[in-house]
Image (cartoon, rainbow, N blue to C red):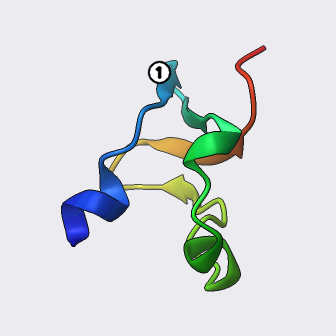
Amino acid sequence: RLAHLLLRPGLLRHTPWEAELIWPLAAVDLALRRAGWDQDPGWLPWLGRTLRFRFGDPS
C-alpha cells in the first residue's frame, strides 16, 4: 500500500539549494491532498535544501 502511495510518475528538479517534485495532474491522490500530505515542507536541514511539491505540467 505504501508503494502505491509513493511510487508515482513525476519529475524531480533540484539545485544545490532547492528540490521540486512535480507530478502530472493524473497522479493526484485526492485523499492525500485532503489530508495535507502535499504541503511544502520548506527548508529541511537534514536535506540541506528547500523541498516543494507541484502538480501539473512541468514548465
Residue 52 image position (x, y, % from top left): 63, 46
> Looking at the image, which is closer to me, 43 or 11?
11
* Circle 1 residue: 16
User: Which residue is painted at 55% across and 46% down in the image?
Assistant: 27
Please state if 27 lies on the left or on the right of 7 as rendered.
Answer: right
Q: Quadrant of residue 5?
A: bottom left
Residue 31 image position (x, y, % from top left): 59, 79
Residue 5 visible at all: yes
Indicate whether 26 appears above or below 16.
Answer: below
The mark tally for this picture is 1
Residue 46 visible at all: no
| Residue at the limit of the structure toward the top, as seen here | 59
Please state if 8 lies on the left or on the right of 12 as rendered.
Answer: left
User: Which residue is painted at 42% across and 33% down in the image?
Assistant: 9
Rate crowding at label 1 as few (under 14), some (14 to 19) or many (20 or more) other CA atoms within 10 Å: few
Residue 58 image position (x, y, % from top left): 70, 19
Please state if 13 lies on the left or on the right of 33 as rendered.
Answer: left
> Looking at the image, which is closer to me, 1 or 18?
1
Residue 20 image position (x, y, % from top left): 58, 34
Identify residue type, mark 1: Pro
Q: Quadrant of residue 36?
A: bottom right
Indicate whether 7 appears above or below 42.
Answer: above
From the image, which quarter does the C terminus lie in? top right
> Looking at the image, which is closer to me, 50 or 56?
56
| Residue at the limit of the structure toward the front, as seen here | 26
User: Which residue is painted at 66% across and 66% down in the image?
Assistant: 39
From the image, which quarter does the N terminus lie in? bottom left
Classify mark 1: helix, strand or loop: loop
